[in-house]
Image (cartoon, grey):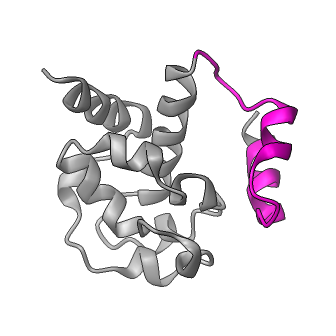
Amino acid sequence: MTKSEYAAARIEEISGTNPYRCMKCGKCSASCPTFSEMDIKPHQFVSYVLHDDVEALAASKSLWKCLGCFACVERCPRDVKPGRIIDAARQLVLRQRGNSYLSADEISKMEADLPPQLLVSAFRRW
């Protein structure tokens, strides 16, 4: 198993989702409040995981633009839960850095236009 395949399997395990159920209908992306700011859209995250392209996910701005509002989870007709896949990818990136959280210093260094809901979601999680 390659590093990327392992990462994709870990994302599936952490998220508890089955990305193979995705039919690429785009309802998750249509309901996303930060859709216009994402370079990889919520429905595309599933494809990246299925194609073991986790490095591209880790490098994308979208990983940190997701608000964690789970509007995509509510809209998905196949119960794929793309928001959980995005959250799992975030966790994997942080774990690879040796952390299980973002420090206050890291948050302040991130883009100044981060939506407040993202920060609230992060605090809610921890």
Q: At x 80% / y 52%, what residue is drawn?
A: 119
Quarter of the rendering containing residue 58: top left
Q: At x 57% / y 63%, what residue is drawn?
A: 70
In the rendering, at what x and y percent does residue 94 appear? 57, 28
User: Which residue is outermost to the left?
Assistant: 1
**Residue 105 within the segment the image draws in magenta:** yes
In the rendering, at what x and y percent does residue 60 appear? 47, 54
In the rendering, at what x and y percent does residue 8 appear? 28, 36
**Residue 121 within the segment the image draws in magenta:** yes
**Figure check: 68 above or below 78:** above
In the rendering, at what x and y percent does residue 88 appear? 47, 39
Q: Quadrant of the C terminus?
A: top right
Q: At x 56% / y 71%, what residue is drawn?
A: 71
Q: Quadrant of the N terminus?
A: top left
For the record, the magenta segment spans 98-122
Quarter of the rendering containing residue 68: bottom right
